[in-house]
Structures are given as structure tokens and as C-alpha cells.
Image (cartoon, coloured by chain):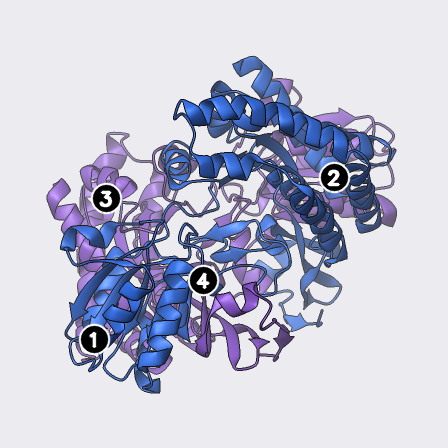
Chain colours: A blue, B purple
Amino acid sequence: MEDNFSKTAFRAKSASKKLAVLSGEIKDKALLLVAENIEKNKDKIFEANRQDLESAKNLVESGEITSSTFNRLKLDENKMRDMVQGIKDIVSLENPVGKVLLKRELDEGLVLTKTSCPIGVLGIIFEARPDVISQISALAIKSSNAVILKGGKESINTNKMIMSVIQEALDSVPEFPKNVLNQVFTREDVAEMLKQDKYIDLIIPRGGNKLVKFIKENTKIPVLGHADGICHIFADESADLEKAKKIIIDAKTQYPSACNSVETLLIHKDFPFRDELLNALKEAGIELIFTPESWHKEYGEKKLSVKTVNSLEEAIEHINEYSSGHTESIITENKENAKIFMNAVDSAGVYHNISTRFADGFRYGFGAEVGISTNKTHARGPVGLEGLTIYKYTIEGNGHIVKDYAEGVKSFHHKDLGV
Amino acid sequence: MEDNFSKTAFRAKSASKKLAVLSGEIKDKALLLVAENIEKNKDKIFEANRQDLESAKNLVESGEITSSTFNRLKLDENKMRDMVQGIKDIVSLENPVGKVLLKRELDEGLVLTKTSCPIGVLGIIFEARPDVISQISALAIKSSNAVILKGGKESINTNKMIMSVIQEALDSVPEFPKNVLNQVFTREDVAEMLKQDKYIDLIIPRGGNKLVKFIKENTKIPVLGHADGICHIFADESADLEKAKKIIIDAKTQYPSACNSVETLLIHKDFPFRDELLNALKEAGIELIFTPESWHKEYGEKKLSVKTVNSLEEAIEHINEYSSGHTESIITENKENAKIFMNAVDSAGVYHNISTRFADGFRYGFGAEVGISTNKTHARGPVGLEGLTIYKYTIEGNGHIVKDYAEGVKSFHHKDLGV
């Protein structure tokens, strides 16, 4: 197994070098053919999905998977249309690779250029949703990264069929390198993937927080994503009652299992409409919990921890201690308080008078999204194609040597040339 | 020990939150006072350094440290002047925190802003050079990051004295938070530091490749830096002999122990002046080595591996296999070959007709430099202040909820407002 995985990883690395120098036109052409081929073969994909659903039914009955997992597994015409449209949307985005980020003349005839380039090989580990494959594959191709995909075992037939349909389209483009997309299937493969820091440059887990936590704790490869989504809303003493009701109800009930749903409500002790607010939340079907043990909780359902705080500072301290660094919001009519809160809270998203549910790449206008990161390095918050790139520095010269500069014969003038 | 270190780490994290909201003016004021205080107390620092040098002399005699380590340990008037000037240079750089990177109206009254912010707490582990303390401390303060520093035991008295002089200056600024700079001293502290991913956001090792390798292999915290510097020069069949001589001699002999010195020379089989070139290198005191075992070697002295390749492609493949991803250069009069090489070689720096020794933050015009990174995420190549920052997203709204957009009552218009 180890041997097989190493071969896959080595092939992916080799493919990534070829993909790195492929033109944007060829990548877009290949992606459009992929979208077309998925459309053309949707019945085959539905058929494979039906096999997976058949097996999954038994797993639901025996309690091995939940009915919500079953629903995520199921492909329908809507999801299929979104898959195809998603690829076309990615084609329409700007090529994130080969962008000149800086151009600077260091000295006469000595020009430094900073250019965006792909990261290399991405390891993608995802759970039930088979539609993730086409999205991630398209993002990887658009950003010139090779991928090794490991999907959930419940969707194995669907995953294999989607991959073979994608691969067939890629194979029809003679310039497109082989082995850009690679699929592995076992837990042992995942264990190997997490060890292969020689070949894999970034791991992206797409799934529940157990999966993400396991991965973060078991690899030295950088991991892009978030484990928890413990988001907070703070209503200060000047909060508008109607805005507070509307925002908190949206943040808790519009999609309770989303990572950007609110989990804890902090209320300033001098907020005058506390009872009215809490009653409105209860009427919206939200269960309120007032114990300190709940401050670490991500409910994923219509439950909300509530705490009274004595000051803006206490609210900020509570959030910086208990938040997972995902998204927080302050409800206040006091602009100064909003400013202090947004500066001092150390999370990927910090909002004023809106729902935490806005934390999303599509809503931010990034087009496609790889995921939401709570990392403090590389990429933070909703991550688009830019998060799948890094950069390199090139210098053009003509016999320039460092000795001349060290000895003062020549000197740098560092003139930015604009990009 | 574990307990003590945790307290230090917790205090550093708390300090980082206060530092994150400190104005650029206060940071610069504090830094100028630090520069002044070092200048004023240089005799005390020299005296502490003399104690360290006294002990180190015995270590050189007993062979425990090399004479080059001894030299790096020694402070003189030049190094002292550079320390003070280095801090002043950092003051003159733009505040890297609080820069607006993107401003976008998502919908009427709903404005997204992406703003640069500090990473949090940096763990800095460095070897003999005590002058690193003032440089790293100044970079950390300028970028609003708290630090935990662990210096080499050979320079313990110097390190302690420099830190106390720096701290004295910071303490004289009432607005400046306590515990921004923290120093630890033992190997056990380092072991604890590498485990504290709750409090420490980034580790920066400054030292030899053994140190860096050890750290990279023993922590899940992101590490910024490079272990090896196995840099290559490829002379193709059209290379100009005089340029080749000049560039290779500079890249190998100007400072052989630097990470950006060349270690392997690849020569195209049809390069017509092979013997002349190799003779010139030997005359410059370079020992040439022709065995495949040497392709992994970083000599750090005037030795150079030499390999004949049959094509540009073979040169690229060799480099992508054996390079540490630091810096490579092609010597060619063929512009097309240069372009292919610079696109296909996957290293932080890829040059045409210049010495690999140009890989350096000062030479690139970045002002101060944290180090050179061979990472494929976050920051690559010479890293300046920007590499010590990340960003957060804030949104200003007025009661906006996601339900309205999900149900089609409202829609996003994503209008960039310019920054």
C-alpha cells in the first residue's frame, strides 16, 4: 500500500510540473470539455449514485450513517446542474497563475519579477458529498495544481464514475498532462497521504470537524480549512432590538449545521430589552442554554449558549478565548464600539450589525471557494483560487555578480516598474 | 518547566492582542527609544559579550564549537552600529498592519473590507549571533507580533543584556503593552515551544540546517525558513564563457557558507568551452566533484558538484529532483531557453545570467528580512515584514441577513470600491 501510494504521489508531483507551465487557454478548454462530458454522461453518474444510495439505505437503517449524510450523498438534477455550472463559472474566472505581482529594477539591467504560481500537489480528503469532486478538480486545474483525492467510502461508485467521466474529457486534450487527477480509496491511503510531505504541498479536508481535527493532528503538511465553527454574536447596551432579533434568528436558524452559524450570544448587562430578545429567540424555536460548560460548544442545531457580560472588553476577551476564530458579529448602534470590536477580535471575519452566515466565498464575490480557513498563515477566511497559489521570484540580468555590490563597485537603486 | 513555559506563552498571547491594536506611531516611538538605549548601553552589552567570549574560548579549544561560531558570537563596533541602524531602518518602513487590501460593496449598505493584521505570537529560535535579537524584536514590534525568543546558550549573557536594554526602553513608553518580548533559555523550553500550537502561531528558526530540520520535524506549528540551500547553476550550450566564469566564481566563492551559494553546476554536453570553464573554477580555488553521491550535498565551502546533462529538460528535471527549492540560475544567450527554465524550475528564486547570491531581502529591496523561505505556502523566498502579517475580513452592514439572499428577496452586486 505504502509503495502504491508513493507511486501515485510521485506521479502527481511530476504531473504538477507539467501543469505549472500549461497555458490558461488549454486549461479552460479542458475544463469546458469536462463540463460537457459530465452533462453528456449524467445518466451513467446517476446510475452509479443509485448503487451507492442502495447500500447507504442499509447503513441508515443500521444507524451507521445519519439521514443527513444520506441526503448529502444523493445526486439529483439540481446538484448535477450546479456541478456543470460550477465548472463553467471557474472557467470564467481569471487565470490565477502567471500574474505579475511585483516588477522592480534592482540596478541597471537587473530586473526582479514576482509572479504567482501553483503550489504543487494538493491532497483532498472529503466526506459524503460526491459533487465536491468536480468542484475541487476544476479549482485544481484552473490553478495548475495536481490533486490526490480521497472521497468517502459511501460514495465510492459515484466518485469513480465522476472521475472517469472527467478523465475521459481531459484525455481528449492531447496537450493536457497525464496524472493531474488521482484518486485513492482506503484509510491506509489517507495515513500515507498525511506522511508524504516530500510530494504533497497542501492538504484540504472537506468535511465534519472530527475529520478535520484528525487530519490537523496527524500531519506536518500545511492544512487549509477549519475544524470548529464556534461563532459569536455580541449585543451591546445600544443594540437595536429589531436588528438583534432578525440577525440572531438568521444566524442560528437559517442553516443551523453550517460552520458560520452562531453558537454563543453575549448580551451586555445594560441592554434594556434582554427579555424581549430572548423570548423572540425562543419563539423562533431556539433552545437557550445558560451554563459555562456550553461556551466551547458547536451545536449544529437550534441551540444557543447565552452569557451576560459586563463590558465590551469582557465580550472581546470571551470571544478571543472561546472562539474558533471563524466569524463573529457585534450588534450595536455605537460606531466607536463597533470599531473597537472589529479591531480587537482576532477572527477571520468580524462583522457589524449583520448575520455571521455571510462568511462564504460566493457571498464575498470570490466565485468558487475551496473552503473557509481559520489558519493564521497563508490564507484566512473564505479561500478562493488565490489560496491555491504561491509565487516565485525571477531575476533577469547580464553577468551581474554580488561581489560588485559587496565591494561598493555597484549599488542597488530599487526602482519599481509597475505591474 | 512545562507549567512555566505555558504561562510565558499565555502572557505572550495576551500581549499580542494588545499589540494588535497599538498605533503605528507608538510602535515607531518605542523602536526609536530601543535604538537609542542600545546605543547608550553599548558598553554594558560589550561587557556581557566579553563574558560569553571568555567561556566560548574554552569551547573552541575543546572543539565543542567551531571558530566560525565563535566569530558570529563576537560583537564589535560595526555589528553594534548595524544593530542600531537596522532598528532605525525598520522604523522607516511602512506599517505593515492595518493596510486595506480590498474594499467591496456586496450589496447596498453591505461593505466588505480585507485588512492586513498581525499573525499573533512568533516563536524564534536562533543560534550563535546575538545581534539577531534586536533585529527580530524590531521586526516583531513593527508588525505587531509578540515573540518568544530562544537564543544559543553560548551567547546567554549577551542575549540577556540586550533584552534588558530593549525592555527598559519599551517600559518607558506607558502605552506599550507588557510581555510583548519574552525570552526562554533551555532545551526543554524549545521542546515546549514546539508543542504550544494553541498559543504560538509561527516558528522562525534562524540557524544552521540541523537546527531547522529538527524544528520542522518536531512541530505542527507552521515553520518559516529553509533547512537546505542546495542551489544550482546550469550553463547551456550557448552560455557565454566569460559570464559563466564570473557568475559561478561569485556564486561559489563570494561567501561559500551562505545558503544562496551554488552547490551544483550542470553543463550542457554541447557547451564548447567546458575545459576552459572548469580550469578557471579550479584556478579560483574551487574543488570540483564529479560523483552522483554529491548531488544532494550542501558543501558550505569551496567545493562544487559538476554534472553533464544532455538537454535543457534534463537540467530542469535534475534541479526539480535535487534542489532544496531555494535559488537556481541559468547561464545562456538563448532567451527562449531562459524563459523555459524560469517557468519550469520550481524554486523560490530562478535567475538568468546572474549569481545565485542575489537571493536576499536587502538586495530585493525589502528593507529588513526575517529569513528566506523554501515553503510552498504563506511566504516564499526572502521574507520581509509582509510575511509576518495575515489579514482579516470585516463587514459593515445594517441588519442584513442571509435569508433574504437565499430566498431571492435581495441579491449581491459585488462592486469593488478601490483601496
CA gap, disc 3 and disc 1: 61 Å
Mark carried by residue A357:
4
Nearer to us: label 3 or label 1: 1
C-beta proximity under 8 Å, tags 1 and 2: no
Q: Residues within 10 Å of mark 2 (few under 14, many from 20)?
A: many
Q: Chain of mark 1?
A: A
Mark carried by residue B154:
3
Question: Which of the 4 quarters of the picture holds residue A283?
Answer: bottom left
At a point 59% along the width and 55% down the height, the residue shown is A384
Which residue is the site of mark 2? A19
Q: Are marks 4 and 2 on the same chain?
A: yes
For the question of whether residue A407 can be seen, the reply is: no
Mark carried by residue A274:
1
CA gap, disc 4 and disc 2: 36 Å
Q: Amino acid at mark 4?
A: Arg
Q: Chain of mark 2?
A: A
Which of the two discs, 1 and 4, labels the residue nearer the N terminus?
1
Q: Amino acid at mark 2?
A: Leu
Q: Residues within 10 Å of mark 1 (few under 14, many from 20)?
A: some
Circle 2 — which element? Answer: helix
